[in-house]
Amino acid sequence: MSEHRHRPRPRAFRLDDQGVAYDDAPAAVAPTAIIRSETKPIPVSARGDPLDEGEREIETAQRSGMLRRWRLNFSTLLWSGLGGLVSLTFGLWVTSVTEGLFARAQSLGWIGVAFAAAFLSGLIGLVVRELFTLSRQARIAELHAALARAHAEDDRDAARAGVNRLVALYAKRPETARGRAEVQDAAREIIDGRDLIDIAERSLMRPLDAKAHAEIATAAKRVSLVTAISPRAILDVVFVVAQIIRLIRRIAEIYGGRPGLFGFFRLARSILAHLAITGGMAVGDSVLQQLVGHGIASKISARMGEGVLNGLLTARVGLSALAVCRPAPFHVEKRPGVADVAPFLFGGGKDA
């Protein structure tokens, strides 16, 4: 208390005051500061793979559907030779038909040439579209992996580049205008790369996720009801396959664009790989526990049980399609399960 009482209090004075004396003596030497350097944390990338198990599974499934490099082997020679022979046979047949039309009448020959040109133009257009869809799916898979790595390592530059690509992916989608504006505003303010990716996921992916969840729920409900009352097993199989194909194409359209024929095969391959990696038809231990816990097998008939299982299969395929087609990893949003998108299959809502 005494030291505090006798300590001089600060006062204000004017620089031109004659009563103010200036002391030119050097200031006392400041005490030496001891600075202890802390050990720098090892970057996440140096400690091993920064991705969690779920992201590694998705990346593995996406890579399995990629087009592999062309290799010269016996199967390649077989299919290349067969394709060449079929193409030559078809070309000779078109030439023969066109020459026959010209032999009958010149007008018929020119009509045949016009039809052949229309066919060739359509074929070229389909090939270009297939190549474009395959390239787009590859870009989405690369974007997913880049965002996952940038988030795990908190890489600001990589995060900004990935978020810019994500915004450009949905630049022509009117329903994403608000989310794109929020992300662009945040990009000018947010410094942390991880926070920027979280904002992009919350603003852009959340409404698309809601649409995908609704599609999965609708397909699972439709399959479970129809297969429960279908009189023939073959009709069940045809209906389930048709609904799964429709669901995969719809989810791909929500996240990046409807795939073509070869794009669908590539996407289906990635989905099958994801199903195999994550447990496939087993659907997951939690789902099986919920089924047993509610005693569904003892409460419903065999046909109703078959409908529920078909609905579970449809929902499981839909979730794998969502994971493969989604251009951003799950961080802010919870990775959905079957009980999240189709709680009606368990008879108890989401608490089931």
Image (cartoon, helix red, strand yellow):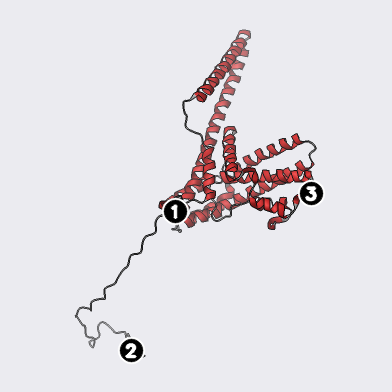
Give the residue at the far left of this rendering.
25
Q: Nearer the viewer, mark 3 or mark 2?
A: 3
Whether residue 6 appears in this view of the structure is: yes
Residue hosting label 1: 153
Q: For the residue carrying disc 1, how many other residues have a C-alpha within 10 Å: few (<14), some (14-19), or many (20+)?
A: many
Residue hosting label 3: 300
Residue 241 is left or right of residue 144, and the answer is right
Residue 58 is left or right of residue 225, and the answer is left
Numbered disc 1: secondary structure: helix
Where in the figure is residue 11, as x and y percent of width and height?
Answer: 32, 85
**Marker count (numbered):** 3
Quarter in which the N terminus is drawn: bottom left
Numbered disc 3: secondary structure: loop
Q: Which is nearer the N-term, disc 3 or disc 2?
A: 2
Q: Which residue is nearer to you in this view: 330 or 55?
A: 55
Whether residue 259 appears in this view of the structure is: no
Q: Residue at x 63, y 41 (%)?
A: 248
